[in-house]
Image: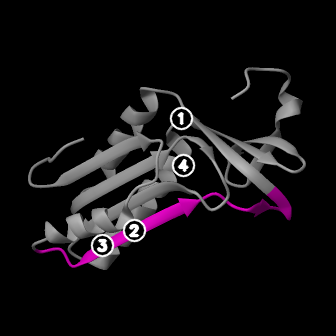
Amino acid sequence: MKKEANRELHASIIKDELDIRRIIDEMISQSEEEGALVMFLGFVKGAVDGVKVMKLKFEAYEPLASNKLAEIVRQESKGCKDVRVFHRVGELNPRDPIIYIFVSAKDRHTAFETAKRLLERAKHEVPIFKLEVREDGEYWVVGDNRRVKRSELGSGKRM
């Protein structure tokens, strides 16, 4: 995505970690009337329901995933100067970053509420599939705290 009417909007599906400090410094340096920058970082859990997680595999249905993420950023960025959302794909280990959301706005209420809406919509609307590899097997993550054991779905393509 690009600058849009004196605003910076960005959405990307990425493989590698980001330099968070660089992004924050860049966003603040471009601020004029903004007084709030909210950053959310979601990361891989080390355990779920007391069971150790070895890795989380992410696969995006492209180009639909990138297009949907960009659409969400455009729709939810009203009142914000700079909005950037990045979602990682590939095999991630516990404590590895998954999703980064940065929102710069004139006030904290707008920044926090925008970041919250972006997160919820990205989690529920962007076609990114998650396979959780745990000590007790592999589970498709199909919603907030809902998991389906991979073996229950029959044999299919391995990620």
Against 6, is 124 above or below?
A: above
Please, which colouring scheme is shown?
one colour
Residue at x 32% of width, y 54% of height: 84
Identified by mark 4, the residue type is Lys
Q: Amino acid at mark 3?
A: Leu
Residue 39, quarter of the rendered image: bottom left
Please tell me how crowded label 2 is: few (under 14), some (14-19), or many (20+) other residues with Cα within 10 Å: some
Identify the residue at the far top of this view.
156
Whether tag 4 and tag 2 are in contact, CB under 8 A, the answer is no
Q: Main secondary structure of the magenta part?
A: strand
Say whether marks 3 and 2 touch (CB < 8 Å).
yes
In front: mark 3 or mark 4? 3
Name the mark nearer the viewer: 4 or 2: 2
Task: Pick whichever of labels 4 and 2 is earlier in the sequence.
Answer: 2
Q: Nearer the viewer, residue 113 or 35?
A: 35
- In the image, residue 86 lies at what x, y percent? 41, 49
The residues tagged by marks 3 and 2 sit, at their Cα atoms, a distance apart of 7 Å
Residue behind mark 1: 127
Q: Which residues are magenta?
A: 33-52
The residue under label 4 is 123
Distance of label 1 from label 4 (alpha carbons): 9 Å
Q: Is 42 placed above or below 11 here? A: below
Q: For mark 2, what is the residue?
A: 39
Q: Is residue 109 above or below residue 144?
A: below
In terms of secondary structure, where does tag 3 sit?
Answer: strand
Q: Residue at x 34, y 41 (%)?
A: 70
Mark 3 nearby-residue class (10 Å; few <14, some 14–19, many ≥20): many
How crowded is the residue under tag 1: few (<14 C-alpha within 10 Å), some, or many (20+)? some
Residue topped by disc 3 = 37
Disc 2 marks which amino acid?
A: Met
